[in-house]
Amino acid sequence: MLGAFRRRYYDVLASVYLYNEYQGYTGLERLLAALRQRYPQEVNFIAAVTKHTADEQKHYRMFKHFFESQGRMPLAVDRTCGYIDQFVSIIFGRSLEELDEKQILENEELFFKLCRLVMMTEFRGMQQVAVLLRSRLVRQNPLLMRIFRVIERDEPSHCFPYQGWLRERGSHLPGFEEKFTDLWIHYSLMLLKIPILFLNVRMRRLATFPA
């Protein structure tokens, strides 16, 4: 019984992370392409976003390897458990896939807002990884511990470049709506959506990895 509980916990945790890392790096690839076209002179910021994109893809591949090493596929998690999906949907009123990065880059206010969402998502990620690294269940899995140690090392370089970009341009940091949205998404995931996912033993698994 305890072994089955532990395996289910690892499956849910790794599946949610795999989905979010995939959405993260594919969304950043689109943003990076638009950024290079709109702000080609911003070499340092482009380099920071390039590293962020590569790191997110690296994290995705680590979770993919986790499942491959276990001989099973991840659960078919969708955007209801996607942190950035929920943030974009609430703040921009559209899905992450429908977001027009070029249009946003043409509107400074919208671009600053997108930077704040990315920054807040990564700060939340830092906090969550710190919690997981103290988790007894996670500490019992050496492979997950190695993955989260890598994420812990990478996360600061994903937050501060966006924060610096905003400060240099005199843009305000997250306001009440964005802070409230961040809290809402976090606690709805932790207290509702992920527990439901854990209990849904009939949930199908992916037939193939998304990339």
Image (cartoon, rainbow, N blue to C red):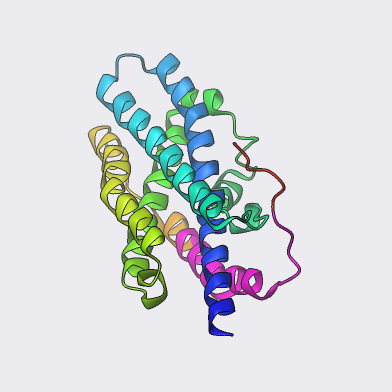
Q: Is residue 188 left or right of residue 147?
A: right
Q: Residue at x 48, y 65 (%)?
A: 186
Q: Is residue 69 left or right of residue 128?
A: right
Residue 179 image offset from top left, x and y in percent = 42, 59
Q: Residue at x 37, y 18 (%)?
A: 39
Q: Residue at x 55, y 42 (%)?
A: 23
**Quadrant in the picture for the N terminus:** bottom right
> Given the current orientation, which residue lies at the most extreme bottom position?
1
The question of residue 192 being in magenta is answered with yes
Residue 152 image offset from top left, x and y in percent = 30, 54
**Quadrant in the picture for the C terminus:** top right
Q: Nearer the viewer, residue 78 or 33?
A: 78
Q: Is residue 103 left or right of residue 203?
A: left
Q: Residue at x 25, y 24 (%)?
A: 44
Q: Is residue 118 visible?
A: yes
Examine the residues drawn in magenta and state their main secondary structure. helix
Magenta-tinted stretch: 181-205
Above or below, 115 against 139 in this view is: above
Above or below, 205 against 137 in this view is: above
Above or below, 204 against 197 in this view is: above
Q: Is residue 83 visible?
A: no
The question of residue 196 being in magenta is answered with yes
Q: Is residue 93 left or right of residue 137?
A: right
Above or below, 15 against 118 in this view is: below
Residue 100 image offset from top left, x and y in percent = 59, 29
